[in-house]
Amino acid sequence: RRPPQEDRAQQLMDDLGLSQFADRIPTEISLGEQQRTGLARALILGPRLLLADEPTGHQDAVWGRGVLRTLRRAADAGTTSLVATHNEEVLKYVDRILAITDGELHEQTPAETARRDAH
Protein backbone atom coordinates (compact mmCIF):
# COMPACT_ATOMS: atom_id res chain seq x y z
CA ARG A 1 0.00 0.00 0.00
CA ARG A 2 1.25 3.46 -0.91
CA PRO A 3 1.58 6.20 1.70
CA PRO A 4 -1.45 8.56 1.80
CA GLN A 5 0.68 11.43 0.46
CA GLU A 6 1.37 9.44 -2.71
CA ASP A 7 -2.35 8.77 -3.18
CA ARG A 8 -3.05 12.47 -2.62
CA ALA A 9 -0.29 13.46 -5.06
CA GLN A 10 -1.72 11.15 -7.72
CA GLN A 11 -5.23 12.54 -7.19
CA LEU A 12 -3.98 16.12 -7.51
CA MET A 13 -1.97 15.26 -10.63
CA ASP A 14 -5.07 13.67 -12.16
CA ASP A 15 -7.28 16.63 -11.19
CA LEU A 16 -4.81 19.12 -12.64
CA GLY A 17 -4.04 17.19 -15.84
CA LEU A 18 -0.46 16.43 -14.86
CA SER A 19 -0.30 12.63 -14.72
CA GLN A 20 1.42 12.33 -18.09
CA PHE A 21 4.21 14.65 -16.86
CA ALA A 22 5.08 12.76 -13.67
CA ASP A 23 8.54 11.77 -14.93
CA ARG A 24 9.38 15.08 -16.61
CA ILE A 25 11.69 17.80 -15.34
CA PRO A 26 10.39 21.39 -15.12
CA THR A 27 12.17 22.57 -18.28
CA GLU A 28 10.29 19.93 -20.27
CA ILE A 29 6.81 21.23 -19.43
CA SER A 30 5.02 24.52 -20.08
CA LEU A 31 4.75 27.40 -17.61
CA GLY A 32 1.10 26.54 -17.03
CA GLU A 33 2.00 22.93 -16.28
CA GLN A 34 4.78 24.13 -13.97
CA GLN A 35 2.29 26.38 -12.20
CA ARG A 36 -0.20 23.53 -11.74
CA THR A 37 2.62 21.29 -10.49
CA GLY A 38 3.49 23.91 -7.87
CA LEU A 39 -0.14 24.03 -6.76
CA ALA A 40 -0.32 20.23 -6.49
CA ARG A 41 2.89 20.13 -4.45
CA ALA A 42 1.60 22.86 -2.15
CA LEU A 43 -1.65 20.98 -1.50
CA ILE A 44 -0.34 17.42 -0.99
CA LEU A 45 -0.15 17.62 2.80
CA GLY A 46 -3.41 19.56 3.21
CA PRO A 47 -2.03 22.86 4.50
CA ARG A 48 -4.16 25.15 6.64
CA LEU A 49 -3.09 28.19 4.57
CA LEU A 50 -2.12 28.54 0.91
CA LEU A 51 -0.83 31.80 -0.57
CA ALA A 52 -1.38 31.99 -4.33
CA ASP A 53 -0.24 34.87 -6.53
CA GLU A 54 -2.10 34.80 -9.87
CA PRO A 55 -2.69 31.01 -9.77
CA THR A 56 -4.48 31.13 -13.13
CA GLY A 57 -1.93 33.46 -14.75
CA HIS A 58 -0.38 30.90 -17.11
CA GLN A 59 -3.51 28.81 -17.67
CA ASP A 60 -5.92 28.72 -20.57
CA ALA A 61 -9.61 29.07 -19.69
CA VAL A 62 -10.13 25.32 -19.19
CA TRP A 63 -7.16 24.80 -16.88
CA GLY A 64 -7.80 28.11 -15.14
CA ARG A 65 -11.18 26.75 -14.08
CA GLY A 66 -9.48 23.47 -13.12
CA VAL A 67 -7.12 25.37 -10.83
CA LEU A 68 -10.04 27.24 -9.28
CA ARG A 69 -12.01 24.03 -8.74
CA THR A 70 -8.94 22.52 -7.05
CA LEU A 71 -8.63 25.55 -4.77
CA ARG A 72 -12.36 25.33 -3.98
CA ARG A 73 -12.06 21.64 -3.07
CA ALA A 74 -9.06 22.48 -0.88
CA ALA A 75 -11.15 25.15 0.86
CA ASP A 76 -13.96 22.67 1.41
CA ALA A 77 -11.37 20.35 3.00
CA GLY A 78 -10.15 23.06 5.38
CA THR A 79 -7.41 24.93 3.50
CA THR A 80 -7.71 28.71 3.51
CA SER A 81 -6.36 30.20 0.28
CA LEU A 82 -5.34 33.82 0.01
CA VAL A 83 -5.34 34.53 -3.71
CA ALA A 84 -3.96 37.66 -5.33
CA THR A 85 -5.41 37.99 -8.82
CA HIS A 86 -6.88 40.19 -11.52
CA ASN A 87 -8.93 37.26 -12.89
CA GLU A 88 -12.62 37.96 -12.23
CA GLU A 89 -13.46 34.27 -12.80
CA VAL A 90 -12.00 33.69 -9.32
CA LEU A 91 -14.99 35.53 -7.81
CA LYS A 92 -17.24 32.57 -8.66
CA TYR A 93 -15.22 30.30 -6.37
CA VAL A 94 -14.56 32.39 -3.25
CA ASP A 95 -16.17 32.88 0.15
CA ARG A 96 -14.74 36.35 0.81
CA ILE A 97 -13.31 39.17 -1.26
CA LEU A 98 -10.66 41.44 0.17
CA ALA A 99 -9.61 44.32 -2.05
CA ILE A 100 -6.81 46.84 -1.82
CA THR A 101 -7.88 50.29 -2.93
CA ASP A 102 -5.60 53.30 -2.56
CA GLY A 103 -3.37 51.28 -0.27
CA GLU A 104 -6.17 50.23 2.10
CA LEU A 105 -7.48 46.71 2.61
CA HIS A 106 -11.25 46.26 2.85
CA GLU A 107 -13.82 43.53 2.39
CA GLN A 108 -16.17 43.66 -0.58
CA THR A 109 -19.28 41.79 -1.53
CA PRO A 110 -19.47 40.33 -5.04
CA ALA A 111 -22.03 43.05 -5.94
CA GLU A 112 -19.64 45.81 -4.84
CA THR A 113 -16.87 44.23 -6.87
CA ALA A 114 -19.11 44.08 -9.96
CA ARG A 115 -20.12 47.74 -9.55
CA ARG A 116 -16.49 48.81 -9.10
CA ASP A 117 -15.42 46.92 -12.21
CA ALA A 118 -18.28 48.41 -14.26
CA HIS A 119 -16.75 51.89 -13.92
Image (spheres, helix red, strand yellow):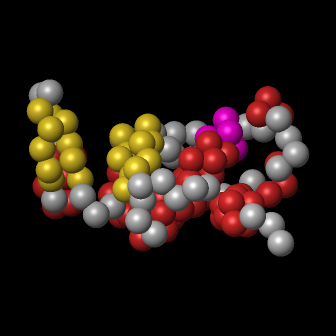
Q: Quadrant of the N terminus?
A: bottom right
Residue at (67% x, 46% y) in the render: 37
**Apparent side of residue 97 relative to residue 54 in the rendered image (left or right):** left
**Highlighted range, magenta:** 31-36
**Apparent side of residue 56 relative to residue 117 in the rendered image (left or right):** right
Q: Viewer-proximal residue, 49 or 58?
A: 49
Image location (x, y in percent) of residue 56: 51, 46
Residue 96 makes an appearance in the image: yes
Q: Is residue 73 above or below residue 101?
A: below
- Number of numbered discs on residues: 0
Residue at (85% x, 41% y) in the render: 24
Q: Quadrant of the C terminus?
A: top left
From the image, give the main secondary structure of the stretch colored magenta.
helix
Q: Quadrant of residue 15?
A: bottom right
Q: Quadrant of residue 90?
A: bottom left
Residue at (84% x, 55% y) in the render: 20
**Apparent side of residue 81 relative to residue 64 in the rendered image (left or right):** left
Residue at (33% x, 61% y) in the render: 94
Task: Indicate whether residue 44 is drawn in magenta.
Answer: no
Residue 63 makes an appearance in the image: no
Q: Is residue 75 above or below residue 63?
A: below
Outermost residue toward the right? 23
Image location (x, y in percent) of residue 14: 72, 64
Image location (x, y in percent) of residue 79: 42, 59
Image location (x, y in percent) of residue 100: 19, 36
